[in-house]
Amino acid sequence: MGGTSTQVSGAGRLAATGGAVMVAGTLTNGLAYLVPMLGARRLPADELGALATALALITIASVAGTGLQTAVAVHRARQPHASTARVAHATTAVSGGVLLAAAPLIVTTLHLPVGVVALLVAMTLAVVLAARWLGELQGDQRFLRLAVGMSVLAVGRYGGVIAGLALGAGLVGSLAAGVLCGYLALPLLRLLARAGAATPGAGAGVPGGAPALGVRRVLTASNATLAMLVVSYADLILARQLLPPAESGAYSVGTVLTKGALWAPQVVTVLALPRMARAGSTTRTTALAVVAACGVALVAGSALAGGLAFRLAGGPDYTTLGGYAPYFAATGALYAVAFVLINAQIATGARWPSVPLWTAAGGLVVVTVFVAPHTFAGIMWSALAAAAVAALVLAVLVHAPGRARHGDGPEQTATVAAVGVGRGRPDRQPSRRNSTELT
């Protein structure tokens, strides 16, 4: 009875933390959508275009922050309480240098004011800096604090811009308010990560202290994140180039369903990543099963109510396209599975986990441009095939014999010795602090 009660209690805590992370992700996406919606009502057309371009550039440049968070989470899961300050500062410095070097090109090619480019650089650096503490919270499995941190960053990142637009501050004034709020959020994130945490650098019993997190692992995770971003948006860009305006617009509505199926179950990956970093195939299998089940449910729902799905995504004019809904949902569901698999490879130290995604993106471009008909259905089927191939190849690589710990080095050897996790051994239970400290 006691064991059953413990399992029920653990399931309840997992549901609570998963729900909190999902709410935080929903808040982030909601605020991100609110900015252009409010900008369309408060800014003239030229400034609205500049705002949309700046937000897109920040999203792309913030890939370094997502990669940093993933790498830090994996490292902290393997090396509890290890310091990650050096690699975080290095990643931020490199990101800032690249953006500053690219600034003249951005100004001239995208016709953005110099002040706007300077503000987007400043905003990107705040997002990258914040990723360190979010990664520490994720790796330590303090998921309720992670949810709070995600919400703090979302409010800081978008709240200032929204307030500026609502008050009529204009493009530059609104972005400046966003930068200010973004940097004000950083001390709060640091406080969340530090409160209740043990002294960094203890090494979890590893002689000589915990090995430092290398920049290569951040680059690997960032590359994988960028690959996922590119491959999931490639069909939308191709549709824009190859289809008439009306069909291109209709296709963009369909990709809303793709993105929904892709991002809806991502909370599973956030929760599973630290456990996958501790060498547990059981966690990976469970995460894949949950994400696949979510995908099946979304595809089935789209098949039964495709017209309603298109109506909700784009309005009543697109209801007649409901028959295509399950195929767009299936594309997103397959990419969601691929997202779990690529994170599983990052967690186990694979050197080039993003190769299948880049290959799928390149194959999609070649097939769509030179082989498939330049029609709505032709691009849709090409995107679905690319997603299926990417997921299949990643599944083969993840489950291939001898690939479970590809790319391991001294860091992983020390970790195995410290936490007592052997190859092929089932997941070890997290420490008492990590399993109970959820707030």
Image (spheres, rainbow, N blue to C red):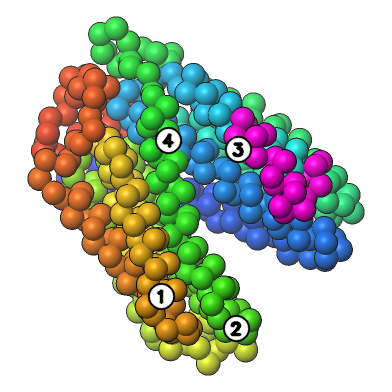
Please provide percent x and percent y for residue 128. Answer: 57, 35
Residue sitting at 87 percent across and 52 percent down? 170
Q: Which residues are magenta?
A: 96-116
Give the CA distance from mark 2 to mark 3: 37 Å
Q: Which residue is mark 4?
A: 219
Number of marks present in the image shown: 4
Which one is earlier in the sequence, the residue at label 1 or at label 4? Answer: 4
SS for dot 2: loop
Which one is earlier in the sequence, the residue at label 2 or at label 1? Answer: 2
Please identify, in this view, whether the residue under mark 2 or under mark 1 is nearer the observer.
1
User: Residue 6: in sight, yes or no?
Assistant: yes
SS for dot 3: helix
Please identify, in this view, whether the residue under mark 2 or under mark 4 is nearer the observer.
2
Please identify, in this view, whether the residue under mark 1 or under mark 4 is nearer the observer.
1
Residue kind at label 2, given as amino acid type: Pro
Main secondary-structure element of the magenta-colored stretch: helix
Q: Which residue is mark 3?
A: 127
Residue kind at label 3, given as amino acid type: Val
Q: Which residue is mark 2?
A: 244
Please provide percent x and percent y for residue 157. Answer: 67, 43
Residue sitting at 39 percent across and 86 percent down? 304
Q: Quadrant of residue 26?
A: bottom right
Q: Is residue 103 magenta?
A: yes
Which one is earlier in the sequence, the residue at label 3 or at label 4? Answer: 3
